[in-house]
């Protein structure tokens, strides 16, 4: 029987650190509430008529789905009122969201999020997720600007994701390992089901969008072709491949059974710097992956060490089982 709720788990973790205010637990509780609401919104599917696209585009020039906007609003609403958060930024908003004056209480934290990751999958009933990252708000800043959010991934105090799959899960780290919780819908609580998640260091499974192959650079060409050669090739083993097109689902699979996830730079993406966004996709996922014993790199540098230059900055991403990340990084050095 799984009996430890996420709230109990977080409070006990805080006590171990001698932090008895419970403030951080309360902050996370609001995020948990937002994820439960998003889980319901996504789960209702076509019943509530929110499966379509809108006429609007986000700052990245992507057509917004109805649910991109609905889930963004859910996150803002759930997290703005308690006074812990000084500002929020998201994939779906050009600029940071300023907390309304009536709720302002010198919040200590900044919250970044991708409210609906993998949203191209939402109307085909394939897993989607929410990704979030928590940073400290710089001292004395009451109306955080984009520049205040531009802290390296190593400064994150917490990172997590919710996966709306065959069950809804919340996976998070506060820098002391990675723990997974499963939503019991009848009770309405997340229970600890996957304590101390660890990514196996070796794997025979990789994930990449193969349709971009003709645009890839030499190191990725070499890596994938060697995987495809299987047992007869230089790697001496057969590889399996997966591509869900939801980073959350992809990383979750890797946390459970290992694997390598790649959204590398390619000639088509060169001007943009990559596909995935650093602040609310690559950084939180990198923190989770590293905390679970995996590795995360652009191919040339550790993602968590990058000094961000823009809120919606994009980066190449190579993450997952440590030994496999090392192989591909070594090909970038040659
Ligand atoms: P989002 O839905 O938040 O824009 O993110 C989608 C991302 C990521 O989740 C996924 O790995 C990737 O885009 C899929 O890209 P392709 O459609 O190019 O495969
Ligand atoms: Mn995303
Ligand atoms: Mn998204």
Image: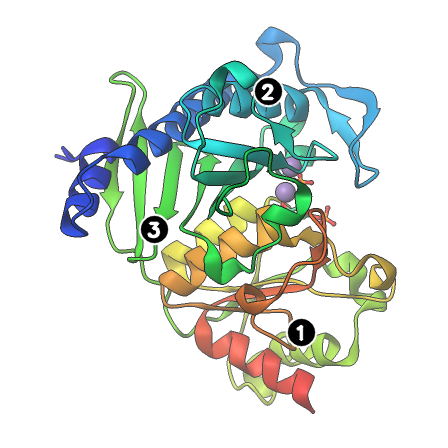
Q: Look at the numbered discs 3 and 2 and tell me whether their residues touch, using CB distance below 8 Å.
A: no
Residue 115 seen by the camera: no
Quadrant field for ligand 3: top right
Residue 127 vs 246, above or below: the answer is above
Dot 1 lies on which element? helix
Label drawn at residue 138: none
3 vs 1, front mark = 3
* CA distance for labels 3 and 1: 33 Å
Residue at figure coordinates x 60%, y 7% from the top left: 48
Quadrant of the snapshot with the C terminus: bottom right
Label drawn at residue 174: 3
Quadrant of the snapshot with the N terminus: top left
Residue 13 vs 119, above or below: the answer is below
Q: Percent x, y for residue 21?
A: 22, 35
Quickly name the residue at label 2: 73
> 10 Å neighbourhood of mark 3: few (<14), some, or many (≥20)?
some
| In the image, the residue with mark 3 has its CB under 8 Å from the nearest atom of ligand 2 | no
């Amino acid at each position: 029987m799984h009996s430890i709720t996420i709230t109990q788990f977080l409070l006990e973790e805080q006590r171990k650190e001698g932090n008895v205010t419970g403030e951080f637990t309360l902050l996370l509780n609001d995020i948990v509430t937002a994820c439960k609401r998003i889980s319901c919104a996504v789960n209702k599917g076509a019943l509530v008529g929110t499966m379509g696209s809108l006429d609007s585009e986000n700052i990245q020039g992507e057509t917004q789905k109805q649910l991109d906007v609905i889930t963004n609003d859910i996150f803002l609403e759930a997290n703005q009122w308690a006074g812990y958060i000084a500002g929020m930024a998201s994939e779906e908003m050009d600029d940071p969201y300023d907390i309304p004056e009536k709720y302002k209480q010198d919040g200590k934290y900044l919250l970044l999020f991708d409210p609906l990751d993998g949203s191209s999958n939402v109307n085909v009933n394939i897993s989607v997720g929410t990704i979030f990252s928590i940073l400290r708000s710089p001292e004395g800043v009451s109306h955080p600007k984009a520049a205040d959010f531009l802290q390296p991934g190593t400064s994150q105090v917490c990172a997590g994701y919710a996966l709306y799959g065959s069950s809804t899960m919340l996976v998070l780290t506060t820098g002391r390992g990675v723990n997974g919780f499963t939503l019991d819908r009848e009770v309405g609580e997340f229970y600890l089901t996957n304590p101390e998640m660890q990514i196996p260091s070796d794997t025979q499974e990789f994930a990449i969008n193969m349709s971009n192959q003709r645009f890839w650079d030499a190191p990725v060409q070499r890596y994938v072709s060697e995987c495809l050669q299987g047992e007869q090739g230089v790697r001496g083993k057969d590889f399996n491949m997966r591509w869900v097109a939801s980073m959350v689902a992809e990383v979750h699979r890797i946390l459970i059974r290992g694997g390598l996830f790649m959204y590398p730079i390619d000639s088509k993406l060169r001007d943009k710097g990559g596909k995935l966004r650093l602040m609310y996709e690559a950084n939180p996922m990198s923190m989770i992956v590293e905390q679970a014993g995996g590795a995360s790199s652009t191919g040339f540098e550790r993602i968590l060490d990058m000094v961000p230059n823009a809120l919606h900055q994009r980066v190449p991403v190579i993450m997952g089982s440590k030994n496999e990340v090392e192989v591909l990084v070594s090909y970038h050095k040659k």
